[in-house]
Image (spheres, coloured by chain):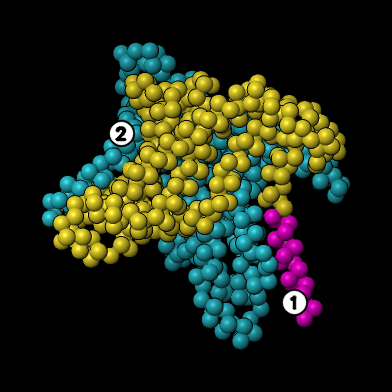
Chain colours: A cyan, B yellow
Amino acid sequence: MKSNQTLAAWVFTGPALIVIGLFFLVPVLLALGLSFTDFDIYALASLKNVQFVGFDNYLTVLRMGLFWKALGNTLYFVVVGVPLSIAAALGAALLVHSRLARWKGFFRTALFTPVVANIIAVAVIWKYLFQQHYGVVNYVLGWFGVQPIDWLGNPHMAMPTIIFFALWKNFGYAMIIVLAGLQAIPDELYEAARLDGASAWKQVRHITLPMLGPTLMTVGLLTMVGYFQLFAEPYVMTEGGPLQSTLSVLYLMYNQGFDWWNLGLASAIAFTLFVFTLAATFLLVRVGRRKGWV
Amino acid sequence: MKAARAATWGVNGLLALVALVALFPLLWMLSVSLMPLGSASTFPPPLLPLHPTLANYRALFVGADLGRYLLNSLIVSGGITLGSLACNVLAGYAFAKLRYAGRERTFSLLLGALVIPTQVAMMPLFLLAREMHIVNSYAGVILPSLASIFGIYLVRQYARAIPTEMLEAARIDGASEFRIFARVVLPLLKPIILTLTILTFLTAWNDFMWPLIVLTGSSHYTLPIALASLARQHSQDVEMLMAGSVVTVVPVLVLFLLLQRYYIQGLLLGSVKG
């Protein structure tokens, strides 16, 4: 009986394990190996041209001005973008969850729609909405006397614009998870608070937010890991410019790996980004643990 | 009473405003896609097409091969969905309910690998695809996505609720493990299969980075890749790009609206650890 199950189990898991092993786990290990070689366009022609170079690629990465620029941009995107996205998600969830809200189903779906809309399409759309002369954004701001802004063409504005875009695209995802968290808070807590005469704001501060701690932690982590992988947005909206102000680490990896075919160096960049992502994750988890959210 | 009314107006007004911001770009896309070429780039920006036309769609399908990219997207997303459903459901059930040596160790290895970003694997994956002669082919996009750790995890979470006694009873009746899976387990997993179907299809349809890398020529471009390339070549032709965006966005949007409940179920299951 047991051995039947063992055989069946390996047959059932076999296809998935082969796919994941061959196309993910083995390539990850190979990438680690690749990052210690000088694999470049000549190696693409003949594997005889590959040489083991130790930590050279990592040293190159750490000495590369462009890498630090890209890392700075990525951190900017993460550090500003994640809290804003979570705050927007929380605000939207509180509104949709509010007893006063009508048409809850419609609003929930409407706010979630950008999440499922294709990222390339909506990036193209927003690129034109942000256009300096004919864009709708500047037109609407003009009603309030704001002079036209070169959103994506000004090196100081391009990253904030991309952050706004990412916020628009992603807040619905966190909102759905926060909404589920809100529904899990027992009504009795609010009733007791109301009997004690607590205002709506006090109820949010002293009941909702503490009870949501673990949920916010989860969506914060998921959003952060996703934001470290910034790529499609600058690829479509700015091509990393102007003046490399929106070049992300992943974009740099793509440039090095698939424009210049420096696959060894690109692998080193990928692992360096992975290390930074892990470090940020541990940091956030530690903060969460101290607050009892993990 | 007055204050309560004001609060109701405030909450709903704010919601309407946020909903407008969320939906406006998509409505604008639809509207501009129906405008004659060149008419959107005027000041003030027009919101509605004065003379609606399908010329942009015609130009894309006739002149820019959009039909082919649409077909490519359907083939790739459909192939990934069918294949990975089979792999993930079988594996997820085995990890949840079958008792065998090595189960926990294998599963925790998979869970551990979940922290590694997929981009790390892309450089060797490209070389592997080259060795397998699947660069610039459907197989090159489909094969690496034929199973997903997240999908297996989702099915496992769901399948754990299947009562073991049911399976044992079938075993005592002499049913084979495969028969038990097909007759007893599969019907019980229907909701999670629907969830996984829509999650996988949407993810595959919207996937960008790997298809961008492995599809080196335009013949096998999926819609997002084709649209990104079009946006670089025709950056002046807003109206045409919006028509391309409509074709890229709308199919999955409709699918999402139809199966919304299952999609959201999947998101929630995926964000809870167990």
Q: Position of residue B76 (x, y in %)?
A: 46, 33
- Mark 1 lies on a secondary structure that is helix
Horizontally, is A144 left or right of B76 in the view?
A: right
Label 1 near label 2: C-beta < 8 Å? no
Q: Residue B4 shows which numbered tag?
A: 1
Q: Position of residue B251 (x, y in %)?
A: 58, 41
Density class for disc 1 (Cα within 10 Å; few <14, some 14-19, many ≥20) is: few
Q: What amino acid is labelled 2 in the image?
A: Leu
Q: Quadrant of residue A182?
A: bottom right
Q: Residue A22 shows which numbered tag?
A: 2
Q: Examine the rendering and report whether any part of residue B247 can be seen.
A: yes
Given residues A150 and B156, the one toward you in this image is B156
Given residues B273 and A77, the one toward you in this image is B273
Vertical comparison of A204 with A137: above or below: below
Q: Main secondary structure of the magenta part?
A: helix
What is the number of callouts on the image?
Answer: 2
Q: Position of residue B6 (x, y in %)?
A: 78, 72
Q: What amino acid is labelled 1 in the image?
A: Ala
Vertical comparison of B62 with A272: above or below: above
Horizontally, is A72 left or right of B77 in the view?
A: right
Which residues lie in the magenta part? B1-19
